[in-house]
Image (spheres, coloured by chain):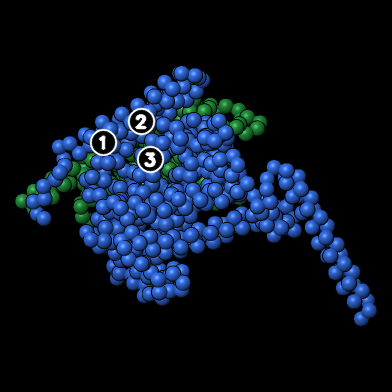
Amino acid sequence: MIFVLTIIAFLTLATAAVALALRNLIHSALLLTVSWSGIAAFYLWAGAEFVAFAQILIYVGAISMVVLFAVLLTRRSRDDFAIAPESVGRAVSALIAGGAVLGVLFGAVVSTRLPDPPTSAPVVTVRRLGLQLMSPHAAALLVVGALLTVALLGAVVLAATARRDATEDAG
Amino acid sequence: MLQMTLALSASACRSLLAGASYLVELAKAWRPAASSDSLLERAPVMLRDAVTGFLPEPWRWFANSLIAIVAILAVFGLLFAYLTLAERKILGRIQNRPGPNRTGWFGLLQPFADGVKALTKEDIVPANADRVLHFLAPVALVALSLLGFAVIPFGRQLVPIELNAAVLYFFAAGAATELAVFMAGWASHNKYSLLAAMRALAQLISYELPLLLSFVPVVMLAGTLSTTEIVAAQGGWKWGFIPHWYVLTPWGFAGFAIFMVAALAESNRSPFDLPEAESELIAGHLTEYSGFKYALFFMAEYFGMCALSGMAVTLFLGGWQAPLPFLEFIPSYAWFAAKLLALLLGFIWIRATFPRLRMDQLTRLAWKFLVPLALINLGTAAFWSLTHDWAGPLQLARWGVAAVLVVGPFVIMGRTLSAGVAPRKYRYA
């Protein structure tokens, strides 16, 4: 079992690392979807079928599309950077952003007190899952929903401004 | 010499004995089940056990899975081949021409001639194309569209994999095919391909929503995501002749209709075949594909169509259940096949009948009509579920309210769907 977990972890981390290193944004996005599928494989390994398939449905089916659309709609040319690449400013901002995310995640993981694992795997019915999602975890569900809506609206705004530029050029 | 023959005959005897005892075990194995199922019903499973029975236990599972995979590939591969022929023949008859009839009797060998043609054609890759993605796109598409077959119960005992979250698995596998379409369009390094791929993605994402929303009532009422349990929940007959299929309830009928429209769009079938759009975008994301890769795209399209139809049969049409009690002697997989073929013929008939939608009509139909209807249908199903203990005259009220909830929004929204936007004036045409 640990052997399988090692393979899954290696694939997930390796594809993510290669995605970071690649210059071609589309290749990076496609590799990221492989990485997300690796996370789904980890959930499957852990016996959480529902979460695994939900992960694939949402990340591989929807988030990857958002990423690809964002890449295609926003990037006009190869030299269109807000901050010059390979500059100190870019390195510093990357370090600050990455460090902040790492700090928040690390703090959350360390401070969470996990309940003792049950001796036998619980039988999860759809009804119980729905009740769990709708009562104790309703806030998380709503936050995720709001986040995705904002992302969608952002994509629409970006696409709409791009189109106005194009018509002005044509006129 | 004598010793050798003795040893040989001894080993032959031993293997014979082993074979005989194996046969006896097989005979024992099928006796207890005989009381519940007919011989034909168990024939496929018995055949499989006869082949894999001699393997040790840990390997038997592996061999059984392999056999299931080979069977699915063979059955649906052949179905794909003859579906193309049936489609061409039926389209031909509807258009008052004979269709292909030169190859074999009634054109029966036409699919194989087409296969040889596709295999021997030159495989052209554009000079500027992203070669790896250009190659991966059709492969990924076919592989992902085959995944869905794994959870469909083809018969009482013919379920390739039993998963607790089978329905979710099916649609997760289907959602991943969008990536392959994007890969095909982007890797071709052709503006028509990229434009068409974006259009195809817009269509696939738009119709994903009603597709997913339309089966939620089924999950709600059956209380499970497992396909076998959903089929089992539709077993039995009311008054001995009305089957408990979900399509025969108001919310089930609406869900089935929405599911089939969305399935048409998801599998790029006419009247939603804009992604291909021969006349506007020169075959869309398929422009730069030729030969066998082109054929693979069509194979994936037909596999997707078969898988979605199979899911529709499972979710709404009672799966492998017989429509009437006295028809149960016909094996369950035959009923499944009959329902599947009926739906596929419906797909072909629709293709021959309806004109293609325009892009704005397509998205409007999804977002302003199907999604609200599916959401209202969710409410109808909740009402149906809450009133399951109403009896007598209240039963009539239950049907009446549910029917109004289904038909009312359909009529109102259908009337106002094109208000203000149609008929459209063509200034440049």
Q: Chain of mark 1?
A: B
In this view, which residue lies farthest toward the right? B2
Residue drawn at point x = 26 percent, y = 58 percent = B277
Q: Position of residue B419 (x, y in %)?
A: 17, 36
Which chain is represented by blue in the image?
B
Q: Chain of mark 2?
A: B
Q: Which residue is mark 1?
A: B414
Crowding at label 3, few (<14), some or many (≥20) Cα neighbours within 10 Å? some
- Mark 1: which secondary structure? helix
Residue drawn at point x = 57 percent, y = 58 percent = B71
Q: Which residue is mark 3?
A: B257
Which chain is represented by green in the image?
A
As drawn, the label of residue B406 is 2
Q: Earlier in the sequence, mark 2 or mark 3?
A: 3
Query: Does residue B382 sit above or below B180 in this rendering?
Result: above
Query: Does residue A93 sit above or below B382 in this rendering?
Result: below
Tell me the quadrant of the picture where the N terminus of chain B can be found: bottom right
Q: Position of residue B372 (x, y in %)?
A: 31, 33
Q: Amino acid at mark 1?
A: Gly
